Image (cartoon, rainbow, N blue to C red):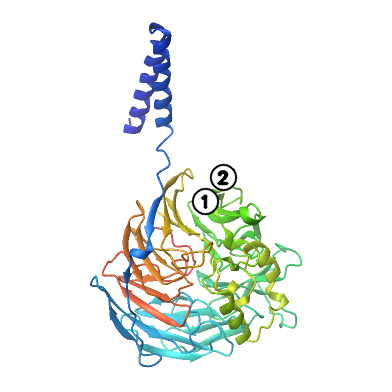
Amino acid sequence: MSSQSSWALSLGASLSLLLGVTALFPPDSRQEVKTITAAASKAAEGPAKQAVKRIDLSTGVNVNLPRPKRDLEAASFGTSDGRSGWVLRLPGGRPIATPAYADGMLFVGGGYGSHDFYAVDAETGKIIWQIQTGEDGPTAAVVADGLVAFNTESCTLIVVDERRGRLVWQEWLGDPLMSQPAIDKGVLYTAHPAATGRPAKRAEFHPQAAWPGGSHRLLAADLKTGRHIWEQEISGDVITAPVISDGTVYFTTFDGNSYALNATDGSVVWVKANAATSAPVISSGQLYETRKGGRGKEMFEGLARVDAKKGEAQDKELIAKSKAEYLQKGNGGGVALSAQATASLDSSVGFSAAPPAAKLAQANDNLGVSTVVGAWAYQGSRAAVSKGQILNAQGNYINSVRASDGGQSWQAEVVGSHAAPGGQIFSPPAVGRDYLYLAGADGHLLSVNQSDGGVGFSYAMKAPIAFQPALAKGNLYVGTSDGRLICLKTGNKDADGWYAWGGNVQHNKVQ
């Protein structure tokens, strides 16, 4: 018999004894027995919700990043507590997406509006190769089978050779492309507008429309050749990226709809309109996503546990919900870019107003995102799963929730940030074996113990960061919103295995 079963029988026996002898006590003593019984029942329900912890970013170690003498030449730095790293300045000073790691190299675009894409030595920051793209705005990349795949915001899906940057194939898909591709078992998945005038290509499967008349498509193509396998009608562009798990493609569109499609032929598993606010993560038959609720100043965001096969929520209410002013219309969705910066960046690539294909009116209604660069950089409060815990950064909180029952293991309130009040302090966490690694809107790099929310390290880099970090071989890699690529050498093997946005090429790394 298990120790848990023995404990339950012991508790039951104790309660029976207490109830059985109640009649022996005078009336005043019965109240005492009631109190004991209630306390025992409460204990049987599980541990009480823990007190909210506080993480004060103002106590972080200040790091004075060096100014590289010239673009594309890495400069080394040290921290006062003994760590080191390097910083590489990319031309143009534009927001840099999450770098991808493979075979000792980082693969990263020159930022929103840039026509450049780079392979960088992951240890030294030295440029290995550089290519120019025909269109601007490289997204975060994914690397598989010796091939690097990424979209450009302005229209094109590109696949190049990992070692030399040689173009393998590319395809114009429509303007704008605000999400990144995913790869699974030699197939690439990406979203694009249902552009008129785009040459039709033969496909192996022609699934029934998931969203008839939808403004966008999800494409499945052969990674090595670009051959179309299927295309599926969907309601809008995809938040951040498609996510693949167990033969199913999951994703959320900017208008709040959640999808599950058969990865083989694009057929619909389920579609739900549920005000979702992030890409999902899937583990052990459960899907976890964030959703919004409430209205106006009372708007909040929280986690939802969902049956991955049916799309049905497992809880009546959102878990670990907190105020979400950043999701209010016109508030920018919490993206770590100022309103002035987003307007300037869109203008720099020719958008005096967003093209109709972007469907930003719907994105603004659901997420508060109203610019193309804002949608390109938006990641929401996307969760990660590690050791049976659902973990996310949401507003000014970091949450750890038990996947089994939705109970909160711990919550940390983050204070001391200079980010805009009511916004997102951190992008979604990268996940090591024991720690979370977070990058902040006002330049903080933070590691947090997954078990209890304790801080491992806290650095004030004084460089605004919009995207999730990558982790490889003890190093943390992050792109800044002003065009720099930073490597922090943590000296801890825990910082490893998170090689792309979402951890892997399926964007579904689960520890």
Measured along the vertical axis of the image, is residue 409 above or below residue 421? above
Measured along the vertical axis of the image, is residue 309 above or below residue 98? above
The answer to whether mark 2 and mark 1 are in CB contact below 8 A is yes
Q: Quadrant of the N terminus?
A: top left
Label 2 crowd bin: few (<14), some (14–19), many (20+), radius 10 Å: some
The image quadrant that residue 33 belongs to is: top left
Look at mark 2 in the image and give the residue it sits on. Answer: 314
Residue 149: image location, x then y, percent: 51, 79
Residue 422: image location, x then y, percent: 54, 61
Q: Report the residue at 54% width, 59% height from top.
A: 280
Q: CA distance from mark 2 to mark 1?
A: 9 Å
Measured along the vertical axis of the image, is residue 250 above or below residue 471? above
SS of the residue under disc 1: strand
Residue 230: image location, x then y, percent: 65, 70
Look at mark 1 in the image and give the residue it sits on. Answer: 286
Q: Report the residue at 41% width, 90% height from top.
A: 129
Residue 124: image location, x then y, percent: 31, 83
Q: Report the residue at 73% width, 76% height from top.
A: 356
Q: How many marks?
A: 2
Of label 2 and label 1, which has the lower sequence position? 1
SS of the residue under disc 2: loop
Amino acid type assigned to the residue bearing label 2 in the image: Gln
Using residue 416 as the reference point, say whether residue 369 is left or right of it: right
Is 178 in front, or is 221? 178
Using residue 144 as the reference point, say whether residue 251 is left or right of it: right
Q: Is residue 250 visible?
A: no
Is 244 in front, or is 375? 375
Amino acid type assigned to the residue bearing label 1 in the image: Gln
Q: Is residue 72 visible?
A: yes
The image quadrant that residue 296 belongs to is: bottom right
**Residue 384 - label:** none
Measured along the vertical axis of the image, is residue 449 above or below residue 226? above
